[in-house]
């Protein structure tokens, strides 16, 4: 069983622009590396069979950057503007289909400890039970987080919520591992009008798949200029 990685880097990063960050979001640097370069490096260090990336049509700098990267595995680049992350995922779908592979999908902006990604991926590759393993965190510092409902005894995901609820602990971290059974539901979900990745995560639960939470100690999304400093501090520790 091999692992294909998908990377969604098609957002506009409008909040960063409004706060004076001139670089396109994927090229923002944290710890001396661009966000997109760091993730691609980590993918390759964690058994990538291939890496597939989507960027929007306005991000010519990001496309030019990707063209300079030389990998020992295939690097597939999709250039297309999409309305949301779920539609970006759909555009990557053809590169992720493979009966002999599992997939790991991330957005471009999560910062986390590298060893935690390695443990997460290793666990899923040895997991013959769960259809999806969703990266979550109890560090809540997001304007509109997706709250994750889990069973207390085993962290099996039972649903998602857009608002905080009594006893809520985890939010989605923008990191998703799935097997081909979960991936096969993508076209149907699209036809049925699913919007955003949070909608697809709920769709998997509603379809009766085994969806499990995997806690990271902290995941910081780079949405604001202040998040860059927070992420630098996290990596320095």
Image (cartoon, grey):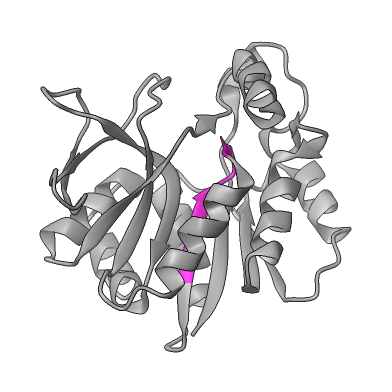
Asked whether, in this view, residue 145 is left or right of residue 41, the answer is: left
**In the orientation shown, which residue stands out farthest toward the bottom?**
100
Instruction: Give me the residue at 25% from left, 74% from top.
Output: 129
Q: Is residue 29 visible?
A: yes
Task: Please provide percent x and percent y for residue 50.
Answer: 64, 74
Q: Is residue 91 visible?
A: no
Q: Closest to the observer: 113 or 31?
A: 113
Q: Quadrant of residue 173?
A: top left
Task: Please provide percent x and percent y for residue 46.
Answer: 63, 65
- Quadrant, the C terminus: top right
54 lies above or below 142: below
11 lies above or below 220: below
Instruction: Give me the residue at 60% from left, 19% from top.
Output: 227
Q: Closest to the observer: 74 or 191?
A: 74
Write down the region rendered in magenta. 103-112
Asked whether, in this view, residue 182 is left or right of residue 137, the answer is: left
Q: Quadrant of residue 14?
A: top right
Q: Closest to the observer: 54 or 148?
A: 148
Instruction: Give me the residue at 42% from left, 88% from top.
Output: 99
Secondary structure mostly seen in the magenta stretch: strand
Is 59 included in the stretch rendered in magenta?
no
Asked whether, in this view, residue 178 is left or right of residue 209, the answer is: right
Q: How many discs appear?
A: 0
Task: Please provide percent x and percent y for residue 145.
Answer: 34, 28
182 lies above or below 192: below
Task: Please provide percent x and percent y for residue 138.
Answer: 35, 30
Q: Closest to the observer: 16 or 159?
A: 159
Is 106 included in the stretch rendered in magenta?
yes
Instruction: Give me the residue at 83% from left, 50% from top.
Output: 65
């Amino acid at each position: 069983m091999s692992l294909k990685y998908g990377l969604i880097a098609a957002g506009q990063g409008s909040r960063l622009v409004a706060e004076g960050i001139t670089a396109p979001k994927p090229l923002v640097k944290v710890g001396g590396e661009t966000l997109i370069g760091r993730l691609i490096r980590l993918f390759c260090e964690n058994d990538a069979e291939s890496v597939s990336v989507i960027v929007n049509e306005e991000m010519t700098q990001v496309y030019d950057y990707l063209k300079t990267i030389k990998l020992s595995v295939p690097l597939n680049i999709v250039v297309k503007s999409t309305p949301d992350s779920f539609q970006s995922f759909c555009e990557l779908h053809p590169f992720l289909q493979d009966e002999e592979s599992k997939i790991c999908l991330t957005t471009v902006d999560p910062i986390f400890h590298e060893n935690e990604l390695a443990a997460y991926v290793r666990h899923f590759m040895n997991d013959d039970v769960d259809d999806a393993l969703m990266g979550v965190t109890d560090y809540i510092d997001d304007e509109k987080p997706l709250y994750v409902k889990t069973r207390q005894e085993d962290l099996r995901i039972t649903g998602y919520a857009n608002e905080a609820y009594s006893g809520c602990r985890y939010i989605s971290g923008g990191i998703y591992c799935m097997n081909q059974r979960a991936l096969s539901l993508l076209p149907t979900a699209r036809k049925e009008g699913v919007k955003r990745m949070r909608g697809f995560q709920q769709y998997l639960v509603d379809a009766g798949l085994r969806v499990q939470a995997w806690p990271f100690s902290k995941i910081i999304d780079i949405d604001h200029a202040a998040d860059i400093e927070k992420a630098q501090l996290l990596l320095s520790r």
